[in-house]
């Protein structure tokens, strides 16, 4: 008798979806858009209605935004069609027909794409760090500025601190996986770095190099100077406050000219057109 073939059991890594893991580890559209919308209204004196999410990936933030209000509109721009298609299947498909009509995903280069003007352009998760020369980053800021209405605002995030210059791995435990942030290489001469994201699972399997980034670690003064060179009227730094009990960040960002010399920090840059 022929022996029955044993079914090969797949590992947790083989069954995992890297986009689901990324969104669970890195993104928080609710908190992000709370900061963006409240800051926009405080500066512009009116509610935020339309956004363009550059380097949008799965368009998680754009989909969240249009789902939060009937007046909300969003455009997502990204070069990678498979990732945009994933977002269409997993985020846009879950929206109401009305909300889907208020979001557009564009496969295109943020340095070249033409879109309707919006209230706010977002470039989050340090995505603009992929521009590793002053000329290219300035060019991106010029294009982002051109996409804004007259009182529009560009929102960026940035990270730094002395640990940002180190080659290290940081692990964050989640319910059924571990998120690994791997600063694999750093060149202090040109500030170029290679960062990787891995995911580890309880069964011992690993999704290695789920995402890989080749960036320049820009400093806040450099980014600010380039924003002003690109024509923005102002570029403010919003620094996170500290929880007095834990000594950790409290999630509240306010405009300031004085930061702390932390091992690692994340800040926002808010540039008014």
Image (tube, helix red, strand yellow):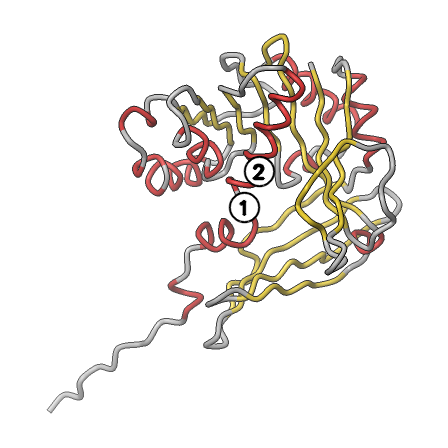
Whether residue 8 sits left or right of residue 267 in the image: it is: left
Question: Which residue ends up furthest to the bottom in the rendered image?
Answer: 1
Q: Position of residue 12 (x, y in %)?
A: 41, 69
Query: Of tags 2 and 1, which is closer to the observer?
Result: 2
Q: Is residue 60 above or below residue 172?
A: above
Residue 228: image tag = none
> 267 or 38: nearer the eye?
38
Work out how far the residue at label 2 is from the one at label 1, CA to CA, in angstroms. 8 Å
34 or 64: nearer the viewer:
34
- Kindly indicate whether the residue at mark 1 contacts the one at mark 2 (C-beta within 8 angstroms): yes
Identified at 87% across, 37% down, the residue is 258
Mark 1 element type: loop
x and y, in percent, of residue 95 in the image: 32, 34
Which mark is drawn over residue 27?
A: 1
Image position, residue 217 (x, y; %): 77, 42
Q: Quadrant of the C terminus?
A: top right
């Amino acid at each position: 008798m022929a022996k029955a073939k044993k079914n090969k059991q797949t590992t947790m890594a083989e069954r995992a979806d890297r986009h689901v893991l990324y969104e669970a580890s890195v993104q928080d559209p609710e908190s992000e858009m709370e900061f963006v919308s409240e800051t926009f209204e405080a500066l512009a004196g009116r509610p935020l209605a339309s956004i363009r999410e550059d380097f949008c990936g799965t368009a998680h933030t754009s989909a969240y935004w249009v789902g939060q209000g009937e007046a909300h509109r969003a455009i997502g721009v990204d070069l990678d069609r498979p990732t945009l298609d994933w977002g269409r299947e997993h985020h846009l498909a879950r929206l109401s027909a009305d909300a889907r009509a208020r979001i557009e995903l564009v496969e295109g280069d943020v340095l070249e794409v033409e879109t309707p003007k919006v209230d706010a352009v977002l470039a989050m998760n340090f995505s603009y760090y992929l521009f590793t020369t002053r000329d290219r980053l300035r060019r991106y800021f010029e294009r982002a500025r051109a996409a804004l209405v007259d009182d529009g605002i560009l929102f960026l995030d940035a990270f730094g601190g002395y640990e940002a210059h180190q080659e290290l791995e940081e692990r964050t435990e989640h319910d059924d996986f571990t998120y690994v942030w791997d600063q694999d290489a750093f060149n202090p001469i040109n500030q170029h770095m290679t960062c990787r994201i891995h995911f580890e699972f309880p069964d011992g399997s690993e999704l290695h190099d789920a995402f890989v980034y080749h960036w320049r670690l820009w400093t806040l003064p450099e980014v600010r100077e380039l924003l002003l060179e690109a024509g923005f009227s102002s570029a403010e730094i919003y620094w996170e406050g500290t929880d007095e009990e834990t000594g950790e960040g409290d999630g509240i960002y306010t405009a300031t000219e004085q930061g702390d010399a932390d091992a690692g920090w994340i800040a926002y840059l808010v540039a008014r057109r």
